[in-house]
Amino acid sequence: ALSECLGCLDHGLHKAHARAPDPRLLRVSNDQEQGFVQVGTSGWHVDGVMLQAPFHVQTMHFVSSIPGGDTLFLGFREFLESLGSEDLDRLRKLWFVSGVGKDIPAGDGQLSVVPLVYRHPFTGVFA
């Protein structure tokens, strides 16, 4: 499929849902019979930021959505480039806390703490 042409799909960040046509795909829904629920609902986040080599490309396919249920995307590099130096300096001092798992405080999952603004490990560009 298209995603395979863009790079490795095996990142190990999620379990496969029984209805997923391929175990490497994250199937999300508001119906637990159709996919995982409550995924990405905690607010602003960066997919894959906890990986040593973050995603280069991410693809999504939305079968349906509710009216007004828009998902908005913003390239972080483009966001950083739009900031003034004072705001950028402030962001460079912040850290991003993210986790994957059922009960992270109890040790069931993976927690990562990384700089909010960092140099991409391959391109060297701030991201």
Image (tube, rainbow, N blue to C red):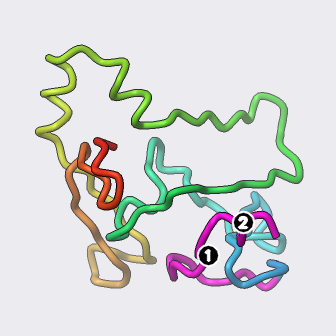
Q: Position of residue 70 (x, y in %)?
A: 71, 33
**What amino acid is found at the position of numbered circle 2 in the picture?**
Ser
Question: Looking at the image, which is closer to me, 107 or 111?
Answer: 111
Q: Tell me if label 1 and label 2 are in contact, CB under 8 Å.
A: yes
Disc sitting over residue 72 in the figure:
none
Q: How crowded is mark 1: few (under 14 residues within 10 Å), some or many (20 or more)?
A: few
Which residue is drawn at the image coordinates 42% and 71% (left, top)? 100
Which residue is drawn at the image coordinates 51% and 57% (left, top)? 56
Q: Position of residue 122 (x, y in %)?
A: 34, 60
Question: Looking at the image, which is closer to me, 87 or 119?
Answer: 119
Q: Could you tell me which quadrant the C terminus lies in?
A: top left
Verify whether residue 9 appears in magenta: yes
Disc sitting over residue 3 in the figure:
2
**What amino acid is found at the position of numbered circle 1 in the picture?**
Leu
Q: Gap between marks 1 and 2, in whole Å? A: 7 Å
User: Which residue lies under the disc numbered 1?
Assistant: 9
Horizontal relation, residue 126 to residue 101: left or right: left
Q: Is mark 1 on a helix, strand or loop?
A: loop
Q: Is mark 2 on a helix, strand or loop?
A: helix
Q: Residue furthest right?
A: 63
